[in-house]
Amino acid sequence: MNPFWNNLYDSFKDRRYAALFFFALGALVLSPVLLPAMALYGLSRGMWALRRARGNRRNKWRRAPLSRDEVRVARSKLRDGSGPVIRPPVQVPDTDLKY
């Protein structure tokens, strides 16, 4: 007696749809297992993103503390009385040349 899969495949191999048939059969068998797992994964990621967004909303206006280097530079500016570096404006070359 031939195995079940040989009989199942023989009816589709002449039509060259065997790969498509087995893919569809596998999807049909695995979908009750994979769909709930994917739904749970998506739901958990959505809840994680929602909790993270709510947490960030509370801290929206808080500023991060300055680093040591930033504090040192700020203190030196206050002590020395020197302000920010003022650079001269960029000179645009004269393109209106008349010959």
Image (cartoon, rainbow, N blue to C red):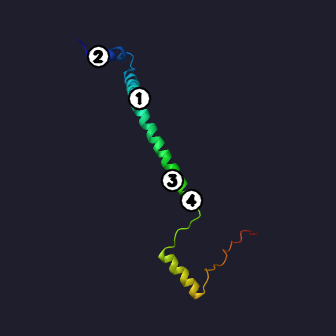
The Cα atoms of the two marked residues, 1 and 2, are separated by 23 Å
The Cα atoms of the two marked residues, 3 and 2, are separated by 52 Å
The Cα atoms of the two marked residues, 1 and 3, are separated by 31 Å
Looking at the image, tell me whether mark 2 or mark 4 is earlier in sequence order.
2
> Which of the image's four quarters has the C terminus?
bottom right
Judge the density around disc 1: few (<14), some (14-19), many (≥20) Cα neighbours within 10 Å: few
> In the image, what residue type sits under mark 3?
Arg
Horizontal side of residue 95 vs 55, given as left or right: right
Q: Are marks 1 and 2 in contact (CB under 8 Å)?
A: no
Q: Position of residue 85 (x, y in %)?
A: 61, 80
User: Which label sits on residue 58?
Assistant: 4
Looking at the image, tell me whether mark 1 or mark 4 is earlier in sequence order.
1
Kindly indicate the quadrant of the structure image that contains residue 33: top left
> In the image, what residue type sits under mark 1?
Pro
Kindly indicate the quadrant of the structure image that contains residue 29: top left
Which residue matches tag 1?
A: 32
Q: Are marks 1 and 3 in contact (CB under 8 Å)?
A: no
User: Which label sits on residue 52?
Assistant: 3
Say which of 54 and 37 sits in front: 54
Looking at the image, tell me whether mark 1 or mark 2 is earlier in sequence order.
2
Kindly indicate the quadrant of the structure image that contains residue 37: top left
The Cα atoms of the two marked residues, 2 and 4, are separated by 62 Å
Looking at the image, tell me whether mark 4 or mark 3 is earlier in sequence order.
3
Judge the density around disc 2: few (<14), some (14-19), many (≥20) Cα neighbours within 10 Å: few
Q: Position of residue 60 (x, y in %)?
A: 58, 61
Identity of the residue drawn at 68% across and 74% down: 91
Looking at the image, tell me whether mark 3 or mark 2 is earlier in sequence order.
2
Q: Position of residue 62 (x, y in %)?
A: 56, 66
Q: Which type of secondary structure does the marked residue at label 2 adopt?
A: helix
Which residue matches tag 2?
A: 4
Q: Residue furthest left?
A: 1
> In the image, what residue type sits under mark 2?
Phe
